[in-house]
Amino acid sequence: MDNKLPKLKRLCAVNDVSGFGKCSLTVALPVVSATGVECACIPTALLSTHTGEFTGWTFRDLTDQMLPIARHWASLGLEFDGIYSGYLASPEQALALEELIGALAGPDTLVICDPAMADNGVYYSGFDDGMAAAFRRLCARADLITPNVTEAALLSGVEYRAAPHSREYIESLFAGLEKHAGRYVAITGVHPAEGVIGTVLRDRVLGETSEDMSPALPGMFYGTGDIFASSLAALLVRGAHVSDALAAASALVRESIERTYERGTPRPWGVDFEGALPAYIRRVERIFASERA
Ligand code: PXL
């Protein structure tokens, strides 16, 4: 019988499980699935919560599981359309991830690296320049990287500047990232002016730049980088045009933050993306209107 449906695209998400706080795998799984892409996962660590604003979190490193899982999958002949990584617990995990990519990626596998290590000019708990060096190597291997402004500064060696971010400053980050990135570079958390925040995305092959800006709500929201990167990764893996993918991923983040704000959810608990998923799925359906998933 002829298959009536196109092949389901498959993304491998390499990220931690923070049991509470809606970040990393606990958002990547629902967001990738809502994009109509299969999400296989390699958990890199198990934490009780993310490490931002909580204290006393538990942590179990799973680095020793990463390669055995990848090798088992390779022995099954599984193929991956994308490999997406986020927060990594240590520079050693970045090395394991390089090997993992070697074991699982084919010539057409899209590699997406979100160098999640810092925000607002400072490293996340437990990280230092060793992590930036490890991410620099990984990002050089990736087709898409999604650093925030702080991470772009740390990767590129350009000085970090707080808002407002001028066009010249963002250009200097893109220039500094040249050797540490593949085709697509999305710099998130760009504040061009008071009360405005968004992402500037450069397609380095076509030399095209797209951006998505929204009114900024005050405060720092956890997990939004993970929601954005997993959505953008899944949309590109499914074959969306990069500007459609940027608009849909940005709208999902914006609506998730709005709901969190309107509900008064404590910020460390993560953003309320659940209620934003139906509109996201409708947007995804419009992008891929000509095919059925
Ligand atoms: O959302 C990024 C992230 C992921 N995983 C863990 C974190 C953070 C940010 O603080 O602590 C464990």
Image (cartoon, rainbow, N blue to C red):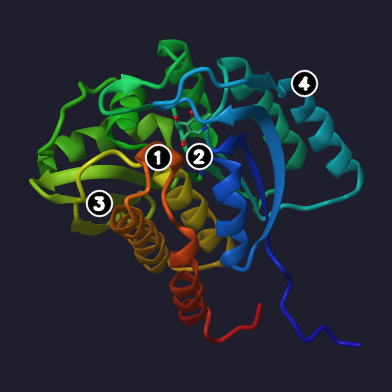
- Labels 1, 2: front one: 2
Q: Position of residue 287 (x, y in %)?
A: 47, 77
Label 4, secondary structure: give it. helix
Label 4–label 2 contact, CB within 8 A: no
- Labels 1, 4: front one: 1
Classify mark 2 as within 8 Å of ligand 1 or not, answering yes or no.
yes
Q: Nearer the viewer, residue 275 or 132?
A: 275
What residue is pinned by disc 4?
64
What residue is pinned by disc 3?
198
Please state which amino acid type lies under the numbered disc 1: Tyr
Q: Position of residue 228 (x, y in %)?
A: 43, 51
Q: Which mark is residue 21?
A: 2
What residue is pinned by disc 1?
222
Q: Nearer the viewer, residue 52 or 117?
A: 52
- Residue at x-position 48% and y-position 78%: 282
Please state which amino acid type lies under the numbered disc 3: Gly
Q: Is residue 148 visible?
A: yes
Q: Is residue 105 visible?
A: no
Label 1–label 2 contact, CB within 8 A: yes
- Labels 1, 3: front one: 1
Label 2, secondary structure: give it. loop
Neighbourhood count class around disc 3 (C-alpha, 10 Å): few under 14, some 14–19, many 20 upward: some
The correct choice, above or below, for 60 with respect to 217 in the image is: above
The correct choice, above or below, for 41 with respect to 49 in the image is: below
Q: Position of residue 225 (x, y in %)?
A: 41, 43
